[in-house]
Image (cartoon, helix red, strand yellow):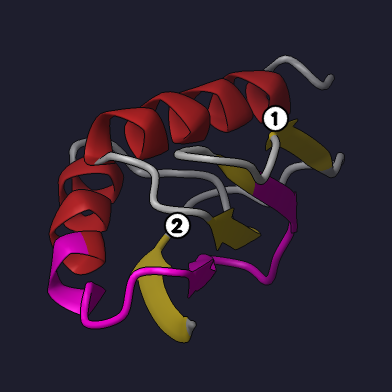
């Protein structure tokens, strides 16, 4: 079990918290809550040791293509593939965006 922390530049702070996914075989859960201005913080708890660079590469692709909202993200991973991680992140951002 490994805990990883990442931080990225962000835009506006959303008004709502959300949860997507579930922890289970090959999947993950994402908890997203409003953060502090201009920062996106990610904490990953993963069952896959030594995967920090893989997570960092994925987050850089997702969070640098457009300015994400300022949120704190807590990810509970149980061996999800990068495709599943990206899908869950997109679901979470869509829910936050539509939370108006």
Query: Which element type, helix, strand or loop, lies under badge 2?
Result: loop
Query: Which element type, helix, strand or loop, lies under badge 1?
Result: helix
Residue sitting farthest toward the front: 25
| Label 2 environment density (alpha carbons within 10 Å; few <14, some 14–19, many ≥20) | many
Residue that appears at 84% across and 19% down: 100
Residue that appears at 45% across and 39% down: 26
Q: Nearer the viewer, residue 40 or 43?
A: 43
User: Measured along the vertical axis of the image, is residue 89 above or below residue 72?
Assistant: above
Q: Is residue 60 magenta?
A: no
Which label sits in the foreground, 1 or 2?
1
| Label 1 environment density (alpha carbons within 10 Å; few <14, some 14–19, many ≥20) | many
* Residue 98 picture quarter: top right
* Residue 18 picture quarter: top right
Residue 68 at x, y percent in the picture? 44, 44
Q: Nearer the viewer, residue 42 or 63?
A: 42
Residue 29 at x, y percent in the picture? 64, 45
Q: Nearer the viewer, residue 65 or 42?
A: 42
Horizontal side of residue 83 vs 96, given as left or right: left
Magenta region: 30-54
Nearest to N terminus: mark 1 or mark 2: 2
For residue 10, the mark is 2
For residue 53, the mark is none
User: Measured along the vertical axis of the image, is residue 97 above or below residue 98?
Assistant: below
| Distance from the alpha carbon under mark 1 to that under mark 2 | 14 Å
Name the residue that disc number 1 marks.
Answer: 96
Residue 12 at x, y percent in the picture? 60, 48
User: Measured along the vertical axis of the image, is residue 93 above or below residue 99?
Assistant: below
Residue 55 at x, y percent in the picture? 25, 62
Q: Is residue 47 magenta?
A: yes
Residue that appears at 50% across and 54% down: 78
């Amino acid at each position: 079990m490994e805990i990883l922390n990442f931080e990225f530049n962000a835009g506006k702070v959303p008004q709502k918290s959300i949860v997507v996914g579930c922890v289970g075989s090959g999947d993950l859960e994402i908890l997203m809550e409003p953060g502090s201005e201009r920062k996106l913080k990610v904490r990953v708890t993963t069952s896959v040791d030594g995967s920090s660079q893989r997570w960092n590469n994925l987050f850089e692709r997702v969070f640098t293509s457009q300015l994400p909202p300022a949120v704190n993200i807590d990810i509970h991973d149980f061996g999800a593939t990068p495709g599943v991680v990206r899908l869950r992140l997109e679901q979470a951002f869509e829910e936050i965006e539509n939370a108006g």
